[in-house]
Image (spheres, grey):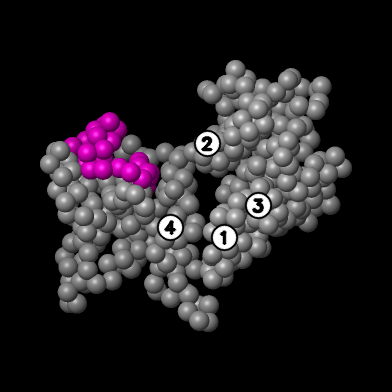
Amino acid sequence: MKATSVFSQNLAAYNQNQRLIVNKGSTRSSKTWSVLQLLCFIAQSTDQPLLISVVSEAMPHLKRGCIRDFENMLQQEGSWNRRNWNATDKIYTIGNSRIEFFSADQPGKVHGPSRDILYINECINIPYETYRQLSIRTTRTVFLDYNPCHEFWVDEHILPRVDCRLIKSTYVDNEFLTKAQVDEIESNKHDEDWWMVYGKGETGAQAGLVMKKWDVVSSMPEDYKYRWLGVDFGFTNDPTVIVDVRLHEGELWIDELLYAKGCDNIQIAEFLSDNDIPRDTPIVGDSSEPKSISEIRSFGWQTEPSIKGKDSVNLGLSILNRYNKHITSRSANIIKEYRNYKWQTDVTGASTNIPIDRMNHSIDAQRYVVLNKLVERKKAAFDYFVGK
């Protein structure tokens, strides 16, 4: 078994019977991989049946993160056995022990039966009360990991405890990164805020974020006043994004339908059909792609170009931020963008009114919708653009 120094530190803390083991660190520091590796080692090394729970904020996050890493890790070690994997319940059996994966947005799981060991991945993304309900149902050890984007309940409630061990790590503690990966991480040193959190693994400040007034919900409302789709076209380098935006009781509800590279216009039309989107649903696409809009319209979809003009980006963001926004928990890419889309800063470090042009593909699709449908209504947008 190839183990990092992060694995060794977690093993030492576990053997010393620490109740709380907190992994705080940068991107690619091996936090997740090392903890999963340790959980497998624990399950393999005991004759006592153990139930180990691996929890994250939402199932899409788990599937792309812990579950994928878990399977890849066991395959690399030559110990993955598909017969031991219950794909429906997301449970893997090792000897007499079971490792289960579930999301924190499942109340029945959070408030359900007890376990022996708990691991909450990216705990910064779940509420303190969720952690509390899970931890009081854990008889032995609790593992937590996160990228320290800002201070949160771990700083106040967990780290001061005498039974807590803090393990800090950065990408340099991951002996198995390639030179290309290291170079890519270090190419971001110029972005001081990013580098503080994702390069040095230090606690950042939740400042300069563009998106305001939003939370995460389990599902979209079935009863709504208006429904629109927004499309940001991509292909090779950028993803094609389709978002479902609904106006309900004066608030916006937003769901990620598609976020993928390599989609042509025929595939977009097929996706809309396969997902039972009604043909009369208004769809707003990036006006810089008139050919794409026309081609999708030719398949029978009610597609229109987005309004663009002077300061349209800032106007669209301003409109979005007027509304309370509810993002579905399965919308992992939207949530990631909301947590990372920031304003540029000047030489003094103060935020400007110019957003950094990255982590914004789904946000662009949302802007197209609100500019076309929610600017008091289109006349105000026209007046704004022509300077009236």
Q: Contact (CB < 8 A) between labels 1 and 3?
A: no
Q: Position of residue 368 (x, y in %)?
A: 27, 56
Residue at which label 2 appears: 63
**Which one is earlier in the sequence, the residue at label 4 or at label 1?**
1
Crowding at label 4, few (<14), some or many (≥20) Cα neighbours within 10 Å?
some
Q: Nearer the viewer, residue 146 or 264?
A: 264
Work out how far the residue at label 1 is from the one at label 2, CA to CA, in angstroms. Answer: 27 Å
Quadrant of the drawing holding the N terminus: top right
Alpha-carbon span between mark 4 and mark 1: 20 Å
Residue carrying label 3 = 29
The numbered dot on residue 183 is 1
What amino acid type should be assigned to the residue bearing mark 4? Met
Residue at 48% of width from left, 75% of height from top? 345
Helix, strand or loop at disc 4?
A: loop
Which kind of residue does numbered mark 3 sit on? Ser
Give the number of the mark in front: 1 or 2: 1
Which numbered disc flags the more N-terminal residue, 3 or 2?
A: 3
**In the rendered image of this protein, does residue 268 appear above or below residue 235?**
above
Q: Residues within 10 Å of mark 2 (few under 14, many from 20)?
A: some
Where are the magenta residues, as a range?
253-281
Residue 162 is left or right of residue 149, and the answer is right
Name the secondary structure under disc 2: helix
